[in-house]
Image (tube, helix red, strand yellow):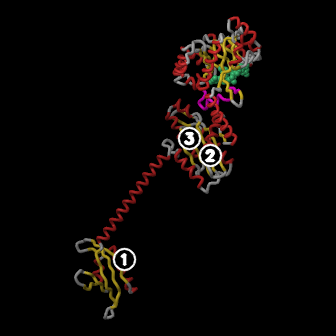
Amino acid sequence: MHRLYETGESFREVPAWLWSNAIHPDDREQAERDFDHAIATRGAYNSQFRIVLPSGEIRHLRSRAHFYVDAEGSPSFIGAEWDVTADVQLNAELARQKLVAEARALALEESNARIEHVADHDYLTGLSNRRLLDKRLAELPADKSITTLAVLHLDLDQFKQINDSHGHAAGDAVLRAAALRITAAIPANGMVARVGGDEFVIVLVNFTDLTELKLITEDLQRRLRKKIRFGQEMLQSGASIGVSWSGDRRARNLLAESDLALYQAKKLGRNRVEFFTRQLQEDLRAKRRLAEELKLGLERGEIVPYYQVQLDARTREVIGFEALARWKHPEKGVLAPGIFLKIADEHGLAAEIDAAILKNVLQDRLFWLLRGFAVPRIAVNISASRLADPALLNKLRKLDIPPGVIVFELVETIFLDDSDEKLLEHIGDIKQMGIDIEIDDFGSGHASLIGLVKLRPKRLKIDRQLVTEVVSSAEQRRVVGSIVEIAKALDVEVIAEGIETEAHAVVLAQLGCDGLQGYAFGYPAPAAETDRLFASTASGIEKQKTATGG
Ligand code: C2E
Ligand code: MG
Ligand code: MG
């Protein structure tokens, strides 16, 4: 076998073995195979291989040749081989660069993914965060594999207390445990996100029916009620859950609806599951409307005081009035606080109501004084939010309230919830202004003797519920008697409220109450109807006694 080898100057014949030997051992087999194939097919010869020069240097050759039969009739190839080392090196370099670029792109993608992960996840629990949740919820409607869809809003009970009494590390431990438990309780195709301090949102898809959904919520509650070990301590939380679900994949309002259901669950007590209903939505809408109306009503001066008289238990003289808020609603008539006070509180309007009442009371008082009436002290009710307002003192100072004419009634619970120093200081300043403090509804909740001692109110008002049974129950009489005794020991006066009959009045006077208030002596009435209870002189008060009794 012969082979043409291009030397650059002339052609000469080269024996096949010499050619083969020059080829890099790794390429030899392939090169020979290419050659044999060309002979067998009598076709074109096409190959590329490395050769090793005597110096040891490696060069890349490309070879092209054609089969032909020469004049003597012997088969032969004619063609050329040329050095493509530079090309090969260039290609190799390009390939290397491409690899480097690809690796770089991959690294970039990875770090992007890491950044995305951080942006989409909660650092503490590793769960998805609000951002990712919103993304997922937005994708759901396009996912045709979804047949049913539910959104659960979950809030840990007692979380604030745990945080406050055991510290943030304990709070963190509770959150991490909750995240693990929730993840364990929901099916793999579900999703859970931490969307706020102790608030989680769970998205469930393709459950069979409501029964399955309920089983999942029960399981969630059961797991979250289990105690959590934190150092030496065992912490216990729990969960309130609001659920909204749909028989298809449209998630439009599920998030907001489950939030409403959660709100309801928490309102009805803790550790509950509430499902969203149209009725719930209607109620909430109505409430929101009422809050809007109330805001307007406040601006329009529709919130006015009604006055209920308070009498001396022994002499039955008028000793004061309690101003009770009424809403002169343009369509619904006169509304009692039961209808609007809670909503006011929920919408941050309670303090404004208190302020409106006080302003009106001062105006009414001035009006009565101008007409020559002897106006006794007037008690106004103060909500917790008003009392907590750091600007309250300044607001009160601007009103130029003469000492001794206004009394503030504070409900007992205010002091139990926060008997903090700030609040006590605030109350001290109010007293300094000549505004007496009374504890309202005393004995209705958790009787707080400590609050009584700390606060040193001028008076306490025994709650109506305790008063009601004094006539029929000896035990209740003893309870009220003890309250009176303690109050006396602390130099605190006592008013009994909710006196509906003369018999009650008599018993409570006997038990040592100083003042009496209730329907027996008068219903809360508008300012214009209150005039008749005033006296312009001392003898007038005598006359009043008989006019208001019974
Ligand atoms: P409260 O301060 O304990 O007022 C006494 C409530 O008992 C009043 O209800 C009064 O109308 C009612 N009442 C008086 N005598 C009797 C009686 O003999 N029998 C019965 N069954 N009830 C009697 P009202 O006016 O509906 O007020 C309810 C509560 O709303 C008040 O309880 C007070 O806590 C709150 N409130 C009223 N006005 C204001 C206000 O201007 N600001 C704030 N923050 N709360 C207010
Ligand atoms: Mg009151
Ligand atoms: Mg009361």
Q: Which span of residues is magenta-colored? A: 334-350
Measuring from the top left, give residue 486's x and y in whole percent.
Answer: 63, 13
Q: Label 3 is placed on what type of residue?
A: Ala
Choose the circle earlier in sequence order: 3 or 1.
1
For the residue with label 3, is its CB less than 8 Å from the closest atom of ligand 1?
no
Residue 253, disc: 2
Measuring from the top left, give residue 230's x and y in whole percent.
Answer: 52, 35
Please rate how many residues cluster around mark 1, counting C-alpha atoms within 10 Å: few if below 14, some from 14 to 19, many from 20.
some
Measuring from the top left, give residue 442's x and y in whole percent.
Answer: 65, 19
> Mark 3 sits on what residue?
178
Q: Is residue 150 left or right of residue 195?
A: right
Q: Is residue 174 above or below residue 92?
A: above
> Mark 1 sits on what residue?
30
Q: Label 1 is placed on what type of residue?
A: Gln
Main SS of residues in magenta: helix
Residue at image coords 59%, 19%: 451
As helix, strand or loop, the secondary structure at mark 3 comes to helix
